[in-house]
């Protein structure tokens, strides 16, 4: 018999009364709906007819913010955190979350959503809430009743305003604190609750001071009121930015405050959450901008500047008032005058310029996130390589596009002429003299101004190389500004991390390549002026390919200080010099590691990896493939995965042919395609080759040694060590690796290339052609250094000044370009000759005053060693 038969009611018997089962209600959803404080997937007539929909439709939420939220949602329940209660901000966030299909909060403190719902949905929700109230009475407070803690622990998404209204007017109830409720929720939740900071930025202008009356009408600069927000969009055409930062996990916070009372934990959590909110705003808008007169007063009133005024007054006999006025004028020429309206205008100009001459500017998401992280931690110090005058504005413009605060840029005072100087000042430029030689006042004033910028939290950008690289190589680090930055960082607040960010700027084709070639050939550099600016406008007639920005591994200043024994400012001069030298080398190496392999660089290296002036296209393609494989083994980043495609190589050759650096040969007797390198164009091809020489330099130098016949392991390694010391101004080596590690790296690279075999006591050549191919990449440097020793014997003397000597050497060497020891015109590069002169003077082979040869035995030994490498 079935169960149904056993329980059936007998005929005629009264039917038992079955108790009615109450409907199943999800307590989280029921209470959330009862509070009517959740965000909406669709909006009603009030939202659209009031214009709020049109306003919110302009909102911009970028992929990095959405990704931060997705990662947080995967780890645990999400609680959005905003600073002040604002219906406009709430609606804008709601619109952005809908657009990206991201989790919506089911509850928000202090906001009702009923008004903005579709009419039928609003009526149903109101009716349900009314029925629930009639049945159960007035809804208890969601925080005091414990509902918020239970709901969030069960997985509900919520939104928390830290303060009740604009400028915190409503405050919060310490006895009924939502943050404390969330801490209780974490004790009930098996997963970590994610506190996600959210800021809505209505305009990019950095915060400024406002009067009491202005704050009453428009709100503060940090927390604008409704009128200010509407005005920003209507009058300024700005698009609101929703910035979602990295989540703070409540277990992490609880671990820091373990054992503390709940109220104290909640107060500490509020402080930390406000800090998270501030830093997200800081990433986009930068620190507060005060009037220049305020900065000038701080700089002029500092003890260092007051001491200089007194010393200068005593030395010259002038009154301190006159000296102070002169120093104020000096500071006026140094300091920036950041102007947000001018930055917006410059954005339009830069957009026209850079989209006109470049095919795009490439900054990867991971590089942008590395920058944001440095902004969040404190003050980023950008250390890019210096390739072009366009660097100054290109980086700032790219930062503006990626919603990053624009840095203050340290530029040479040769660019301070009118009108360019005024323009650069208004987009954050400040100016430094090229040399401090003989200066007693300027270094103190400049250092004090730089320290003030860092103390105020402004991102700083300066060029560690000092000037633009005309050769494509990274220049040796200059220590002046580097030391000032470290001095300022040593006095930073405990919560302000000052971080160096090495950056590589890689142009597929450089706009100044013709000017650089003329300067390297001996032509005097022309001083920048208005005429040069006008003539430079001709660049808009050409396209220069793509630009790539890469951010290397950050170097926190605290890491540098931790390596020193004792306080940074108390270091003795030798220890300080050694620390600056090591820091400069580390930064330049990290820049070098970030360089991108471009089609022009790869093809330029392949063209110059031989002595002959012509090359068949099939051999060029094969050499490009070998070099690219070697670069990939070194971990070099590529501009594209398709560098070896015939069309890519053809486009690079076309760029070189358009500048008459190479020419296609017609009538090849063996058939196929051949290219000839113009002898005068080699120095420009050298520029592009040098963009990747860093990766292959140790292997190339070892190839030179082995190809010269030095195969015994000990002797070859000793010769390689000598060459690396000799090339210290030409090539960048890892300061964190010792010589033995560099030797092993060079050996491994040559073996992987198929050029070398290593025996128990000797090296053996595995393929002479491949060994020569790699050796050719640095042979021109050897020629330059050998040329200087030969040439100084002929042209150096007491009547030849230091500035004139390199050009004398060029004139002496040009007729000898066919000699066995001088076959490459790029060896006559003015920069190479200056570097060689500096190295030989430092090593004691040239007289520091006259540059005449001294110590004949050492000179003969060095000449012989270099000559053997050139055979």
Image (cartoon, rainbow, N blue to C red):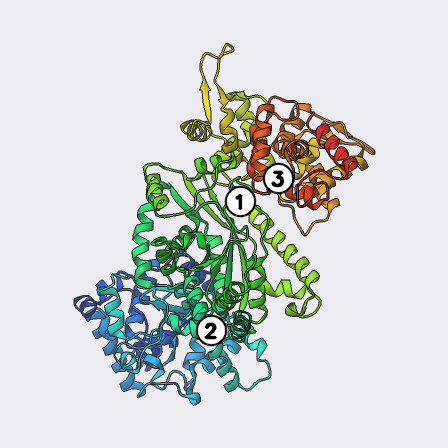
- Residue extending farthest left: 49
- Left/right of residue 614 with respect to residue 283 in the rendered view: right
Report the residue at 60% width, 28% height from top: 813
Q: Is residue 657 visible?
A: yes
- Left/right of residue 603 with respect to residue 809 in the rendered view: left
> Front-most of 11 and 429?
429
The quadrant in which residue 580 appears is: bottom right
Q: Position of residue 238 (x, y in %)?
A: 28, 62
The quadrant in which residue 82 appears is: bottom left
- Left/right of residue 362 with respect to residue 728 in the rendered view: left
Disc on res. 595: 1
Instruction: Give the secondary structure at mark 2.
Output: helix
Q: Earlier in the sequence, mark 3 or mark 1?
A: 1
Q: Position of residue 171 (x, y in %)?
A: 37, 85
Q: Earlier in the sequence, mark 3 or mark 2?
A: 2
- Residue extending farthest front: 317
Report the residue at 27% width, 60% height from top: 58
Report the residue at 32% width, 49% height from top: 351
Instruction: Give the secondary structure at mark 1.
Output: loop
> Front-most of 824 and 268?
824
Q: Nearer the viewer, mark 3 or mark 1?
A: 3
Q: In the rendered image, which quarter contains the N terminus?
A: bottom left
Q: Position of residue 702 (x, y in %)?
A: 70, 35
- Left/right of residue 612 with respect to residue 233 in the rendered view: right
Q: Is residue 9 visible?
A: no
> Front-most of 807 and 427?
807
Q: Nearer the viewer, mark 3 or mark 2?
A: 3
The quadrant in which residue 583 appears is: bottom right
The residue that mark 3 highlights is 799
The residue that mark 2 highlights is 300
């Amino acid at each position: 018999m079935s169960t149904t038969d056993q329980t059936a009611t007998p005929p005629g018997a009264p039917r038992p009364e079955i108790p009615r089962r109450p409907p199943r209600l999800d307590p989280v959803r029921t209470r959330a709906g009862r509070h009517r404080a959740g965000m909406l997937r669709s909006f009603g007539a009030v939202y659209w007819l009031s214009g709020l929909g049109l306003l919110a439709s302009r909102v911009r939420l970028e992929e990095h913010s959405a990704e931060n939220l997705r990662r947080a949602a995967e780890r645990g329940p999400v609680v959005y955190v905003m600073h002040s209660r604002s219906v406009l901000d709430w609606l804008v966030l709601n619109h952005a979350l809908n657009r990206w299909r991201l989790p919506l909060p089911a509850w928000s403190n202090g906001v009702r959503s009923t008004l903005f719902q579709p009419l039928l949905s609003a009526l149903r929700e109101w009716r349900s809430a009314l029925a629930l109230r009639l049945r159960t009475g007035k809804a208890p407070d969601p925080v005091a009743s414990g509902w918020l803690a239970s709901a969030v622990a069960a997985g509900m998404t919520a939104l928390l305003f830290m303060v009740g209204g604009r400028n915190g007017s409503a405050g919060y109830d310490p006895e009924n604190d939502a943050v404390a409720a969330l801490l209780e929720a974490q004790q009930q939740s098996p997963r970590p609750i994610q506190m996600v900071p959210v800021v809505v930025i209505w305009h990019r202008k950095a915060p400024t001071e406002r009067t009491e009356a202005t704050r009453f009408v428009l709100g503060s600069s940090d927390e604008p009121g409704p009128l200010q927000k509407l005005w920003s969009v209507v009058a300024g055409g700005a698009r609101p930015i929703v910035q979602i930062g990295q989540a703070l996990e409540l277990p992490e916070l609880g671990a820091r405050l373990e054992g503390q009372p709940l109220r104290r934990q909640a107060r500490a959590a509020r402080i930390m959450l406000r800090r998270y909110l501030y830093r997200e705003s800081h990433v986009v808008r930068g620190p507060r901008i005060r009037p220049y007169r305020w900065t000038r007063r701080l700089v002029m009133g500092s003890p260092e500047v007051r001491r200089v005024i007194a010393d200068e007054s005593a030395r010259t006999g002038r009154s301190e008032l006159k000296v102070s006025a002169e120093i104020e004028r000096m500071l006026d020429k140094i300091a920036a005058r950041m102007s947000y309206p001018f930055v917006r205008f410059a954005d339009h100009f830069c957009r026209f310029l850079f989209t006109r001459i470049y095919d795009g500017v490439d900054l990867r998401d991971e590089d942008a996130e590395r920058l944001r992280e440095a902004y969040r931690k404190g003050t980023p110090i950008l250390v890019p390589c210096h390739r072009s005058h366009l660097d100054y504005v290109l980086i700032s413009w790219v930062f503006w596009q990626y919603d990053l605060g624009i840095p203050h840029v340290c530029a040479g005072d040769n660019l301070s002429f009118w009108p360019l100087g005024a323009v650069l000042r208004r987009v954050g430029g400040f100016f430094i003299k090229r040399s401090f030689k003989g200066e007693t006042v300027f270094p103190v004033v400049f250092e004090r101004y730089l320290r003030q910028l860092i103390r105020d939290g402004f991102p700083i950008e300066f060029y560690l190389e000092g000037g633009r690289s005309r050769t494509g190589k990274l220049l040796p680090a200059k220590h002046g500004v580097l030391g000032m930055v470290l001095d300022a960082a040593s006095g930073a607040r405990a919560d302000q991390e000052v971080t160096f960010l090495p950056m590589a700027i890689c142009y597929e084709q450089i706009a100044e390549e013709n000017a650089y070639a003329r300067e390297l050939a001996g032509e005097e550099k022309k001083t920048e002026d208005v005429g040069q600016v006008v003539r430079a406008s001709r660049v808009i007639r050409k396209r220069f390919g793509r630009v790539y920005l890469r951010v290397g591994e950050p170097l926190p200043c605290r890491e540098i200080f931790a390596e020193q024994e004792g306080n940074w400012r108390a270091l003795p001069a030798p220890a300080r010099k050694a620390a600056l030298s090591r820091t400069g080398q580390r930064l330049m190496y990290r820049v070098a590691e970030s360089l991108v392999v471009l089609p022009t660089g790869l093809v330029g290296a392949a063209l110059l990896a031989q002595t002959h002036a012509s090359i068949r296209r099939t051999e060029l393609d094969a050499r490009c493939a070998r070099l690219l494989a070697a670069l990939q083994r070194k971990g070099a980043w590529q501009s594209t995965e398709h560098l070896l495609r015939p069309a890519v190589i053809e486009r690079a050759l076309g760029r070189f042919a358009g500048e008459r650096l190479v020419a296609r040969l017609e009538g090849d007797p063996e058939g196929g395609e051949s290219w000839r390198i113009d002898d005068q164009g080699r120095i420009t091809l050298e520029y592009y080759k040098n963009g990747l020489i860093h990766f292959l330099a140790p292997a190339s130098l070892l190839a030179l040694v082995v190809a010269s016949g030095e195969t015994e392991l000990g002797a070859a390694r000793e010769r390689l060590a000598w060459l690396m010391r000799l090339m210290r101004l030409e090539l960048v080596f890892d300061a964190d690796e010792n010589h033995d590690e560099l030797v092993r790296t060079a050996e491994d690279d040559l073996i992987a290339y198929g050029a070398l075999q290593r025996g128990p006591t000797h090296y053996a050549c595995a393929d002479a052609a491949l060994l020569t191919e790699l050796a050719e990449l640095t042979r021109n440097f050897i020629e330059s250094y050998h040329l200087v020793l030969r040439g100084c014997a002929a042209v150096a003397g007491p009547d030849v000044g230091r500035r004139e000597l390199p050009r004398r050497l060029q004139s002496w060497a040009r007729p000898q370009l066919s000699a066995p020891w001088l076959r490459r015109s790029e060896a006559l590069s003015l920069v190479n000759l200056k570097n060689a002169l500096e190295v030989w003077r430092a090593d004691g082979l040239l007289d520091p005053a006259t540059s005449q040869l001294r110590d004949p035995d050492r000179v003969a030994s060095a000449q012989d060693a270099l000559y053997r490498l050139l055979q």
